[in-house]
Amino acid sequence: DFRVIVGQPGVAEALLVEGDAAWAGLVENMKEISSLTAREPIIQRELHAFARDLFAAAATRVGWTARDTDSASDLQKRPLLLGAAAFYGDQRVSDIACSTFFQGEDIDPNLRQVIYRTVVHNGGAIAYESILHLYRQATLQEEKNRLLTALGSTTILALLQRTLEFSLSKDVRSQDAHFGVHAVAANPLGLNLAWRFVKNHWSELTERYRGNNVMVGRFAKVAAKLAARSELEDARAFFAANSVDGLSMTMKQILEAIAVNIAWLDRNLTELAIWTEDRLTLRNR
């Protein structure tokens, strides 16, 4: 609930020092709220500023270097909090990530995903090509998937489209293609692009994964993050016209998820607008 996260001073900060479920849930909830407010740029900008301050402070505490005293929780928390700080635009975290990558420093395997994503997000076409080159050179599939996912973090629309097309190319294993598509969908700039791509390639996807409805469903689930009534109607019409045997329940669940997103905005958008106005007023005093 955004009222708990942003509406009560100190609550979000307290969650970051609680157990694993609390801080992991906070990171996830903030990303969900960010996604749902994609059509409200002023509100989203203020939410990102709030999250940036929150996670930048937490990222400073956990640092970049593993310690002998780190618990299993610390090892999980470090990449999650550094990644969140970078996602919301913390310049210090972004600078360290890019410096580490471009200077060829050894990268802690636990931090590779954070660094790759941050580099692609901030580094433009040159960084994108560098990560794509690493993908083609990598031999471990886990590393390839990290790099493929990172390609979805670019802010250049043409490169987001390229990532979608690359995901279905011969360079990517069939069973891993959805990683690239979902990475684009998770990008605030890429959700509608990814959904359009899935619709335009539906025949190809259903043919490629014939008899494997789990895989087809993974691509269809891109639509579950949509949050506008027009998008709900579009998804409903598309699924009705492009049904797949054995996938009706998945399609129904996706439509229900979109309806839940719409209902969340109906309940909360006015209060979010007031919260945003209050922040802007305080800043301008």
Image (cartoon, rainbow, N blue to C red):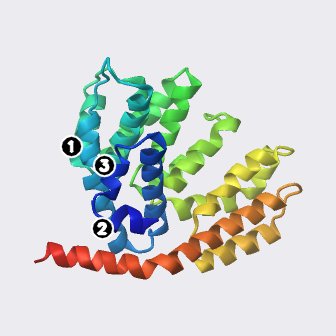
Judge whether 62 appears above or below 225 on screen: above
Residues packed near mark 2 inside 10 Å, few (<14), some (14 to 19) or many (20 plus):
some
Residue occupying image coordinates x 63% and y 62%: 224
Could one spot residue 116 in this view of the protein? no
User: Which is closer to the viewer, label 3 or label 1?
Assistant: 3
| 47 up-or-down from 17: above or below | below
Task: Please tell me in which quadrant of the rendered image residue 125 appears.
Answer: top left
Amino acid type of the residue that numbered disc 3 sits on in the rendered structure: Phe
- Give the number of the disc on residue 245: none
Q: Nearer the viewer, residue 175 or 197?
A: 175
Residue at the farthest top position: 68
Disc on the earlier residue, 3 or 2:
2
Q: Estimate the x, y position of residue 275 in percent, counting from the top left.
A: 32, 76
Q: Dot 3 corresponds to which residue?
A: 55
For the residues labelled 1 and 2, the Cα–Cα distance comes to 19 Å
- What is the spatial separation of the Cα atoms under label 3 and label 1, in whole angstroms? 12 Å
Which residue position is annotated with label 1? 92
Residue 121: give x, y in percent of width and height: 36, 47
Image location of residue 282, percent across then percent down: 17, 75
In the foreground, 169 or 29: 29
Give residue 171's position: percent from left, percent from top: 61, 34
View extreme (left): residue = 285
201 or 65: nearer the eye? 65
Name the residue located 55 percent from the left edge and 34 percent from the top edge.
145
For marks 3 and 1 on the same chain, the one whose residue lies earlier in the sequence: 3
Q: Is residue 16 visible?
A: yes
Residue pointed to by mark 2: 46
Q: Secondary structure at mark 2?
A: helix
